Image (cartoon, rainbow, N blue to C red):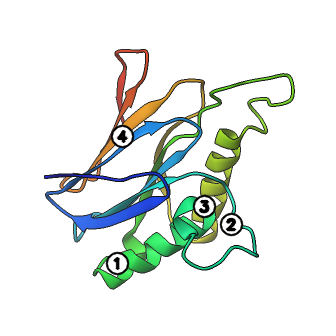
């Protein structure tokens, strides 16, 4: 069974479900997984950091708040917090200009926010396929914990 994960949304489930996020550009897909229980989640996140003034309930839009919310939901669903591992994909620089470079684009900042948030939570980042200037679609298989990345404009498929 495949469940779609839309923009600014996260889904938590367990094997044998496959979670899929379509059309990642600068957005970041964050997959969290507990290999012991087969419980995992996939978030399709839009922006790097949640502003302090944003109301509760908008966590799924932001990489930092979205990851923290996913961890809480995974633990409530029965995942072992200490066994979680992460994979990320997306974070492309779709529209480079003179004012926006690969270093400070939203995509780069999304990937950096994920790495920093995961490190702060002591969750190992075991795979990533980020950056560049191409869109992606990802499938996260909760039976294996693998993430398949399909790159736009290319025949390339990467398993992370």
Q: Position of residue 106 (x, y in %)?
A: 69, 42
Q: How much space separates mark 3 and mark 1, taking CA atoms?
A: 24 Å
Circle 4/circle 1 CB separation < 8 Å = no
Look at 40% across and 15% down and name the residue there.
154
What residue sits right under mark 3 in the picture? 62
Pointer 1 local density, CA inside 10 Å: few below 14, some 14–19, many at least 20: some
Which residue is drawn at the image coordinates 35% and 53% (left, top)?
5
Mark 4 or mark 1: whose residue is earlier in sequence: 1
**Secondary element at image label 3:** loop
Q: Nearer the viewer, mark 2 or mark 1?
A: 2
Which callout, 3 or 1, points to the residue nearer the camera? 3
Up-down relation of residue 32 to residue 44 (above or below): below
Residue 56: image tag: none
**How far from the left and from the top, in percent, is residue 92?**
59, 33
* Element on which disc 2 rests: loop
Dot 4: element: strand
Judge whether 151 appears above or below 20 on screen.
above
Please name the residue that numbered disc 1 is placed on: 80
How far is the residue under mark 2 from the one under mark 3?
5 Å
**Outermost residue toward the front in this view:** 55
Asked if one can make out residue 122 in the rendered structure from this viewpoint, the answer is: no
Does 29 appear above or below 151?
below
Q: CA distance from mark 2 to mark 1?
A: 26 Å
Residue 72 vs 113, above or below: the answer is below
Chain-order first, disc 2 or disc 1: 2
Residue 138, numbered label: 4
Dot 4 and dot 2 residues touching (CB under 8 Å):
no
Furthest toward the bottom, the residue is: 76
The residue where tag 2 is placed is 50
Rendered location of residue 52, percent (x, y): 75, 75
- Mark closer to the observer (4, 3): 3
Circle nearer the N terminus (3, 1): 3
């Amino acid at each position: 069974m495949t469940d779609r994960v839309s923009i600014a949304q996260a889904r938590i489930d367990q094997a044998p479900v496959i979670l899929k996020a379509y059309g990642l550009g600068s957005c970041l897909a964050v997959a969290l997984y507990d290999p012991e229980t087969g419980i995992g989640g996939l978030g399709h996140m839009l922006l790097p950091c949640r502003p302090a003034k944003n109301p509760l309930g908008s966590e799924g839009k932001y990489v930092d708040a979205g990851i923290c919310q996913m961890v809480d939901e995974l633990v409530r669903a029965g995942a072992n917090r200490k066994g979680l591992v992460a994979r990320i994909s997306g974070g492309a620089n779709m529209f480079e200009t003179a004012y926006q470079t690969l270093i400070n684009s939203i995509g780069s900042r999304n990937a950096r926010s994920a790495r920093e948030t995961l490190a702060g939570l002591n969750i190992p980042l075991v795979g990533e396929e980020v950056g560049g200037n191409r869109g992606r679609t990802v499938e996260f298989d909760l039976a294996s914990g693998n993430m398949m990345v399909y790159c736009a404009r290319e025949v390339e498929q990467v398993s992370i």
